[in-house]
Image (tube, helix red, strand yellow):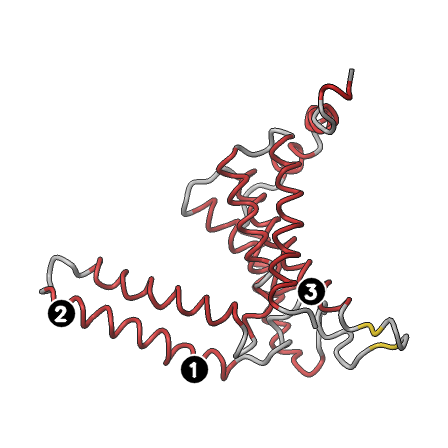
Amino acid sequence: MANFKTHLTGGFAASAILGLVTYKAGLVNANEFLMCVLAGTVGGLLPDIDSDNSIPIKMGFDLASLATGFALIIHWRSELSLLSMLLLWLMGYLIMRYAVFSIFTKLTVHRGIIHSVPYMLVLALSLTCFNYYFLDTSSIVSWFYGSFLFLGSMIHLGLDEAYSVDLLNRRLKRSSGTAMKFYKDTQRYYYLGLYAILLMFIFIAPPFDPFFRKINDPITWWLIRDSLLPEVLMR
């Protein structure tokens, strides 16, 4: 399968190119463009969070542990002394970084249910709903964020599948078909639960029609066409 650097580069390159097209078409502003690229890049690393020794899972839990510690002391900052806040931060960090991390790694198997298309759809819809319902982001921009996250994750899964083909010996490696999957019979109950969650997110997702109409608006395509080449070449 592809390594961390390949996934990072692939996710960033694809989301940056598509993000520039989206920005030049006037679909997102400068800040939203940067967030789209970030979402796509993170999506390019997400499928490997089920690998115990992967860089994404270690980085993710390090950041989550730090954030947990700070969230605890911010919540109780007015009730605790400085020493108590330091101890609370340390406790929150250690529990998240080691206890929760240990439980997570025991419950997940690399290239298991997390490393699948429906799981990535759930994460993309989660991001879409979070931005729309909790951050008051418009439905159009929320869908862009979720779409870029899903795009990055599909780049990841596609690269893993591409690396499972041995072109020199013209054969498929044992890992072929284990990356971009929709179902696995040995995990049927987990997948049934996953698809149930996916249906729930589809049901509560923000309106899709404004997003669909926006990207299909003729004006959008005119702007892309007009900004495709430098003005000196268009004369």
Q: Check disc 3 and give the amino acid type.
A: Leu
User: Disc number at residue 84?
Assistant: 2
Nearest the viewer among 88 and 205 is: 88
Dots 1, 2 in contact, CB < 8 A: no
Q: Are marks 3 and 1 in contact (CB under 8 Å)?
A: no
Residue ID for mark 1: 102
Image coordinates of residue 217 in percent, x first then y, are 69, 28
Q: Secondary structure at mark 3?
A: helix
Q: Residue at x 74, y 19 (%)?
A: 232
Q: On the image, which quarter does residue 175 sit in?
A: bottom right
N-term mark: 3 or 1:
1
Q: Tag 3 or tag 2, which sits nearer the N-term? A: 2
Classify mark 1: residues with Cα within 10 Å, few (<14), some (14-19) or many (20+): few
| SS for callout 1 | helix
- Residue 159, horizontal then vertical, whole percent: 72, 64
Spatial CA distance of label 2 from label 3 is 45 Å
Find disc 3 in the rendering and name its residue.
157
Question: Is 182 above or below relative to 19?
Answer: below
At a point 46% along the width and 67% down the height, the residue shown is 59
